[in-house]
Amino acid sequence: MRVVMVGAECAPLAKVGGLGDFIQGLARALAATGVEVQVLLPYYRGLLAEPFATLLEPLDEGLSIPLDGAVLECACWRLRVEGLDCVLIDPAGDWFRRRHVYGEPDDGLRFALFARAADALLRRPGWRPDIIHCHDWQSALLPALQWAAADAGDPPARVCLTLHNLAHQGVIEPAVLARLGVDAGALLGPGPLDDPAAPGRANLLRGAIHCADFVNTVSPRYAWEVLHTEQGMGLQGVLQSHVDKFGGILNGIDDAVWDPRTDPLIPVHYGPDTLSLKARNGEALRRRLGLRARAAPILAVVSRLDTQKGVELILGGIDSALALSCQVVLLGSAPDPVVAARFAAKREALADCPDAHLELAFDEGLAHLVYAGADMILVPSRYEPCGLTQLIAMRYGTVPLVRRVGGLADTVVDANHSDRPVCERNGYLFEAQTTEAVHAVLARAAWLWRHHPDHFDRLRDNGMRADHGWRRPAARYLDLYRGLLGA
Ligand code: ADP
């Protein structure tokens, strides 16, 4: 079986958040089962780390796609990275020579162009896969193009669409389609890209939900939430009308990348049988970030700082942790300048505090040390399609404190309030989006850390021993692909 993943991120080449981990992890796990997997990404010139840039091999397969009535040439590059076969699409011009992966005013056109080029490549003889697996809005034009071509008699590949975050849907002007030479007649007015909430515009994600052969979210609970609550962000109706091809598959984490027994980015290796060594990573973390040496639990936040992630509750959680005599480490990057300014002000206010450090950056290496050195991690998201930070934290014996929403609710079992056996309890849950609720959950966890460290270690141990690797989810995707192929 040949599967091509098409998306905007794949670690370690391009990663902004969990999407990068997802494509890397699923692709590697599928490849390990013998599936022929390839990942198609834009070539983010200037963002690709030097060691990878030097490994690129040009492919003969130059592509040309229509743009503004002329032809846009796209080079294709191949590289193998950590066992993964990746093809980078490189349109002539500055389309992907930017300072960021996302957040450019012309994102709609840039990624529609990427999807258009990917579609053209995957129609080439020898390139046509059995399954095209698209992710989020950035590749969402591709299912619509395949659907339109099937109507025109061109036998399509089977297309799977994974929804990682419905807040971003790729709502574009129809003129973008016209600029790319796409016959919008079949797709709009009326057509699958019509969006009742944005009359006259084209909604790429809505179109992909309609046109894909299967659609899934990255956790079962988020699948329910997007069907039945406002978390569907206006797509509840289209999802309900396609419920017969819709489901939720819980994400995994790459347990070779995220393994405290072998992680090259942490100073002291440890595992469930050598848990006492974890404390030495806590000491290293304190030294690196200038926290004083103290017998206090370290609360971590590792997050994109975005309203989705619960900005108020993160800020409130920092205050609560300090009031409860904990230490705090925050590693986060905020693309929105207003949010960035709030965290910068907090960092300023805590500049002389020996128990808190706010690192406002994206730093993969530091993230590993934070997971290894911290005792607890706070994830107070407003909504959370799956969430990987709580899974990674558990693998590193760091106890998650999370809001009961989406994939957080599917993966964290409360230490005190659960009908599940003690051996499955691994963290703390809270419901209300209030700083009081965050304070209460932190107080519960800090109390256990101080007064019953053996019980706290049991929570760590349960989290570390649980299997959150990709084998199980990859087997579910494989079943799904086989089902789509009628095998
Ligand atoms: P999302 O995809 O919504 O950002 P996830 O929890 O699914 O959230 O995935 C977040 C991923 O990004 C994790 O691998 C986490 O370690 C990483 N991450 C988030 N913020 C940072 C940061 N500031 N520095 C390094 N890694 C980060």
Image (spheres, rainbow, N blue to C red):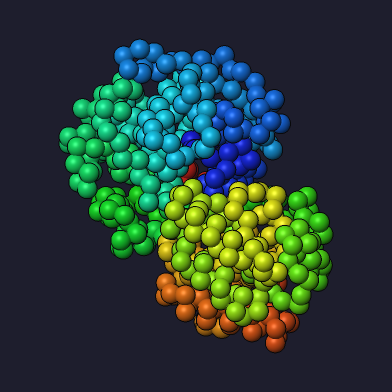
Give how far across and how far down residue 141 sits, in percent.
36, 34
Residue 487 drawn above or below residue 326: above
Give how far across and how far down residue 198 sits, in percent.
22, 44
Q: For residue 143, what is the image quadrant?
A: top left
Locate the N terminus and report the quarter of the image it occupies.
Answer: top right
Identified at 51% across, 15% down, the residue is: 62
Which of 58 and 433 lies nearest the eye of the viewer? 433
Residue 164 drawn above or below residue 327: above
Q: Is residue 452 visible?
A: yes
Q: Is residue 272 visible?
A: no
Q: Residue furthest bottom?
A: 451
Q: How many marks?
A: 0
In the displayed structure image, the side of residue 475 where residue 307 appears, left or right: left
Identified at 64% across, 63% down, the residue is: 351
Which of 99 and 136 lies nearest the eye of the viewer? 99
Which of 322 and 129 lies nearest the eye of the viewer? 322
Give how far across and how far down residue 292 sits, in percent.
76, 69
Identified at 49% across, 55% down, the residue is: 341
Residue 77 drawn above or below residue 258: above
In the displayed structure image, the side of residue 281 where residue 20 appears, left or right: left
Give how far across and how far down residue 485 sits, in percent.
44, 39
Q: For residue 20, what is the image quadrant?
A: top right
